[in-house]
Image (cartoon, grey):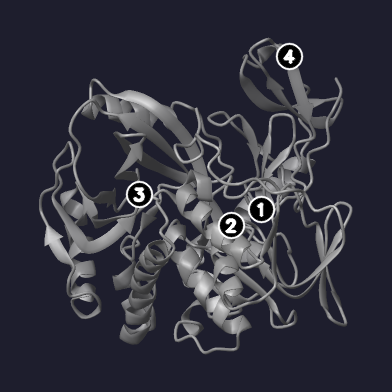
C-alpha cells in the first residue's frame, strides 16, 4: 500500500540536472518547505533553482496527515512557562498567520486541493491527565481566547477532557504543491528532480552545489532537505532527533465526523477525514517512537488496524504509510541562518510534526531575510540560537543512544545461523567477525549489506514494519538492498556477498 496523497502522479515531472548552471538562489529539497520558499522568492522576481534528489514531495510531505493548525499539543503552557507571554503569543500568531496565508495562496491561484476549515482538538481519555488540559487552558486565556474546553467528542470512544481550536484547516498537500509548482514555473523558476547535492563549497561569488556530474552556482542557498545533510558547522545532529509514526487510511463504511483530533499522551492516536475520489477516508495515525528503535508490524500498522476494527468493525483498510519528523530539543523549529560562519545559507527544520503550518512560516521568514525585510517572528525561531537546552533528559538519551550504537559496532559476538532468519524479515548477524545486515525475502533470497550508517557511522537497526534499515542516531533510512531513502545519510550502504 502507499500514501493516499501519492496514489496518483499528480505533479509534473522535471528533468535531472545535466549541465552547470548559475542562479540567485539554489533551494535544495522539493518538499512543501522548499517549494513554498521557491514560490515566494519567484514572486519577488529572484532567479531560483530547486534541486530534488528524487521526486517533488515524494518523501515526508507525501506522507503527512496534512493538518494545518496552530494547536501543537500542549505547547502553550510550556512556552508561557519557559519563555514568557510575548514569546508564546508570537508563536501562536505566527502559526495562525500561516493558516491564513495558505488559504490566501489557494484562493489567489485558484488551487483545487480540498482545503477545508475545521476545528482541531486535543484530548485525553485519562482522568489523571485533566490537570494538564487545565494548565493549557489557563495559558490559552491570554494567548488564544477562542480556545474552549470540551468534555465530549464524536470519536468512537469517550473522552474526559479536551481543548478545541476553531478555524483550523486541512488539505491535500500534493494538489497544493502542484499549484505552487505551476506558479514557480510561470515566474521562471527551474526545478530538477533526481538530482542530489552531495557537497556545498563557498567561492568568491557565493556557493557551489556539487551534484553527481554538475554544479549549481548560487549567491544564496536554502537547505530544505528535512534534516540538514551538512553536519558542520550547523551541528543540527546534536540539537534534534527524528520520530517515526504510522498512518492507515480507512473506509469505515459509516458516516464520519467533522474536525481533527489527537490525544496528548502515548500511545498517540490522530484522526482526520480526507477524500479518496468521492469517498470519505478516515486517516488514523500515531504510535510515535524514536526512529531507529526496533519495531514490528504488529506494534505499528497492526496496532492501528486492530484499533480501527475495534471502533469500526466493517472497516476496510485502503492505505498505509509511515513518516518521520525532526523533533527539536526545545520544541521550537529552527528557521533562518544555517550558521553564523556560513552567510547566505538558510535552513528550515525541526518542525516537530507540524510541518504543513511551519513550512509556510519558514518560507516567509527566509524569503524576508533574503529580501532584507524585517520579519517579526524571526527571532523566536532563530536557527543559530544557543539558549540552554531545556529538555536535558532528551539530550542525555540522544548521547547515550549514539554512544551505544558506536559501541555495538565494536563488540564481537559469536557467528549466527542465517537459517534462523524468518522469510520477509531482517537481522544483523556476525560472520567471520564482521557484522552483516541480512534481509530474507519471501522467496528465501538473501539481501546483505554492511549495516553501518553512511552519515556518521552508527550501527543500523532493522525496521520490520517498513522493511528498512534505520539509523538510531540521526534517522537515516535505507531499503533492504541498501539504497539510501532518507537523509541525513546520502550514500547507499555497501553490499555484502555471502
Label 4: which secondary element: loop
Q: Nearer the viewer, mark 1 or mark 3?
A: 3
At x 80%, y 57%, the residue is 198
Q: Earlier in the sequence, mark 1 or mark 3?
A: 3
Numbered disc total: 4
Residue 43 x, y percent position in the rendering: 56, 74
Residue 213 x, y percent position in the rendering: 89, 53
Q: Nearer the viewer, mark 2 or mark 4?
A: 4
Q: Nearer the viewer, residue 143 or 168?
A: 168
Look at mark 3 in the image and give the residue it sits on.
114
Distance, label 2 to label 4, CA atoms, is: 35 Å
Label 3: which secondary element: loop
Q: Are marks 3 and 2 in contact (CB under 8 Å)?
A: no
Question: Does 223 appear above or below 79?
Answer: above
Look at mark 4 in the image and give the residue it sits on.
445
Label 1: which secondary element: helix
Q: Earlier in the sequence, mark 3 or mark 4?
A: 3
Q: Nearer the viewer, mark 3 or mark 4?
A: 3
Q: Earlier in the sequence, mark 2 or mark 4?
A: 2
At x 69%, y 29%, the residue is 480
Residue 131 visible within the image: yes
Q: Nearer the viewer, mark 1 or mark 4?
A: 4
Look at mark 1 in the image and give the residue it sits on.
402
Q: Are marks 1 and 2 in contact (CB under 8 Å)?
A: yes
Distance, label 3 to label 4, CA atoms, is: 44 Å
Amino acid at each position: 500500500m502507499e500514501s493516499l496523497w501519492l496514489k496518483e502522479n499528480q505533479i509534473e515531472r522535471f528533468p535531472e540536472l545535466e549541465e552547470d548552471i548559475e542562479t540567485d538562489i539554489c533551494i535544495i529539497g522539493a518538499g512543501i518547505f522548499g517549494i513554498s520558499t521557491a514560490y515566494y522568492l519567484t514572486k519577488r522576481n529572484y532567479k531560483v533553482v530547486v534541486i530534488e534528489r528524487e521526486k517533488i514531495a515524494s518523501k515526508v510531505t507525501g506522507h503527512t496527515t496534512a493538518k494545518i493548525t496552530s494547536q501543537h499539543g500542549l505547547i502553550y503552557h510550556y512556552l508561557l512557562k519557559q519563555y514568557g507571554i510575548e514569546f508564546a503569543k508570537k508563536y501562536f500568531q505566527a502559526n495562525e498567520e500561516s493558516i491564513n496565508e495558505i488559504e490566501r495562496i489557494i484562493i489567489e491561484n485558484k488551487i483545487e486541493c480540498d482545503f477545508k476549515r475545521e476545528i482541531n482538538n486535543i484530548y485525553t481519555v485519562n482522568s489523571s491527565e485533566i490537570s494538564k488540559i487545565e494548565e493549557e487552558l489557563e495559558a490559552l486565556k491570554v494567548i488564544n481566547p477562542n480556545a474552549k474546553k470540551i468534555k465530549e467528542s464524536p470519536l468512537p470512544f469517550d473522552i474526559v477532557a479536551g481543548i478545541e481550536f476553531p478555524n483550523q484547516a486541512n488539505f491535500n498537500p500534493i494538489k497544493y504543491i502542484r499549484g505552487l509548482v505551476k506558479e514557480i514555473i510561470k515566474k521562471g523558476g527551474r526545478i530538477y528532480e533526481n538530482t542530489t547535492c552531495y557537497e556545498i563549497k563557498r567561492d568568491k561569488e557565493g556557493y557551489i552545489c556539487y551534484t553527481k556530474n554538475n554544479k549549481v552556482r548560487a549567491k544564496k542557498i536554502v537547505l530544505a532537505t528535512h534534516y540538514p545533510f551538512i553536519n558542520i558547522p550547523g551541528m543540527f545532529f546534536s540539537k534534534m532527533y527524528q520520530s517515526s509514526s504510522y498512518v492507515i487510511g480507512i473506509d469505515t463504511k459509516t458516516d464520519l465526523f467533522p474536525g481533527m483530533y489527537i490525544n496528548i499522551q502515548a500511545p498517540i492516536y490522530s484522526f482526520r477525514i480526507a477524500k479518496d475520489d468521492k469517498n470519505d477516508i478516515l486517516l488514523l495515525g500515531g504510535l510515535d517512537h524514536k526512529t531507529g528503535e526496533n519495531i514490528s508490524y504488529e506494534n505499528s500498522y497492526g496496532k492501528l488496524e486492530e484499533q480501527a476494527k475495534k471502533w469500526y468493525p466493517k472497516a476496510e483498510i485502503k492505505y498505509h504509510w509511515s513518516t518521520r519528523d525532526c523533533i527539536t530539543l526545545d520544541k521550537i523549529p529552527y528557521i533562518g541562518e544555517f550558521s553564523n560562519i556560513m552567510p547566505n545559507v538558510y535552513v528550515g527544520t525541526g518542525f516537530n510534526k507540524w510541518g504543513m503550518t511551519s513550512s509556510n512560516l519558514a518560507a516567509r521568514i527566509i524569503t524576508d531575510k533574503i529580501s532584507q525585510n524585517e520579519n517579526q517572528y524571526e527571532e523566536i525561531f532563530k536557527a543559530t540560537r544557543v539558549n540552554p537546552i531545556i529538555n536535558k533528559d532528551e539530550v542525555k538519551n540522544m548521547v547515550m543512544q549514539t554512544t551505544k550504537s558506536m559501541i555495538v559496532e565494536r563488540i564481537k559476538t559469536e557467528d549466527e545461523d542465517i537459517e534462523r532468519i524468518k522469510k520477509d524479515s531482517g537481522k544483523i548477524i556476525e560472520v567471520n567477525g564482521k557484522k552483516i545486515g541480512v534481509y530474507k525475502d519471501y522467496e528465501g533470497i538473501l539481501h546483505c549489506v554492511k549495516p553501518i550508517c553512511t552519515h556518521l557511522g552508527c550501527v543500523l537497526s532493522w525496521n520490520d514494519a517498513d522493511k528498512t534499515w534505520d539509523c538510531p542516531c540521526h534517522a537515516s533510512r535505507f531499503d533492504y538492498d541498501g539504497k539510501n531513502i532518507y537523509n541525513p545519510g546520502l550514500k547507499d550502504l555497501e553490499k555484502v556477498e555471502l
